[in-house]
Amino acid sequence: MIEISWPLLLTQIITFLIAMIIVWKLFWGPLTRMMQERSRKISGDIQRAESGRRKIEMLEAEYHRRIAEIEEEARKALNAAVHQGNLAREQIIQEAREESQRILEKNREYLAQERKKVIGELRGQLTDISLIAVEKLIGQGLEQSVQQRLMAEFLHEIKGWDKAG
């Protein structure tokens, strides 16, 4: 059978308890505190990481919002530039039309003046030719009053041609 020595067992139990108290005081308490501090630190790190993640998400949302604003501003600026270009094109076309109309009117006036000038010159030449022809046909015996009457009738007929032409 096994014999148990009670004094030895009691000494070992007391030694074990003293050792446990010493281990508890010297090692377990600091170890527990260190584990709690480590747990708090990890918890704080997780909170900071979560806070950083939220901040990054907010910054990313702000970034996307700002990009959308910039794109909208660029689109508006482009539309405004196209509109200004169209207005400038229309203005240039209108000015060109007005200028061509002025040139056309100026040329019409010039042609009308030239036509009057040419008609006047032709009348004078026709008058001279008519007088020469009449003098040759009739001879030199026409009186001045008859010549003037014939000339007036001739000019009257020429004016009628001018209105018809």
Image: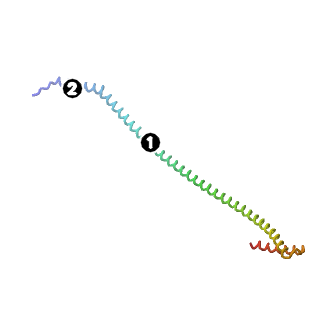
Residue that carries the numbered disc 1 in the rendered image: 56
- Give me the residue at 16% from left, 24% from top: 6
Label number found at residue 108:
none
Q: Secondary structure at mark 1?
A: helix
**Among numbered discs 2 and 1, the one appearing first in the sequence:** 2
Crowding at dot 1, Cα within 10 Å, few <14 / some 14-19 / many 20+, comes out as few
The amino acid type, in three-letter code, at marker 2 is: Ile
Q: In the drawing, does residue 10 fall left or right of residue 96?
A: left
The colour mode here is rainbow
Q: Are marks 2 and 1 in contact (CB under 8 Å)?
A: no
From the viewer's perspective, tell me whether residue 115 is left or right of residue 148.
left
Q: Label 2, secondary structure: give it.
A: helix
Q: Is residue 51 left or right of residue 18?
A: right
Front position among marks 2 and 1 = 1
Quadrant (top left/top right/bottom left/bottom right) for the C terminus:
bottom right
Mark 2 burial class by Cα count in 10 Å: few <14, some 14-19, many 20+: few
Q: Quadrant of the N terminus?
A: top left
Residue 90, picture quadrant: bottom right
State the residue position of label 2: 13
| Rendered location of residue 21, percent (x, y) | 27, 26
25 or 145: which is nearer to us?
145
Counting from the top left corner in percent of width and height, residue 55 is at: 45, 41
Residue drawn where x is 68% and y is 60% of the image: 100
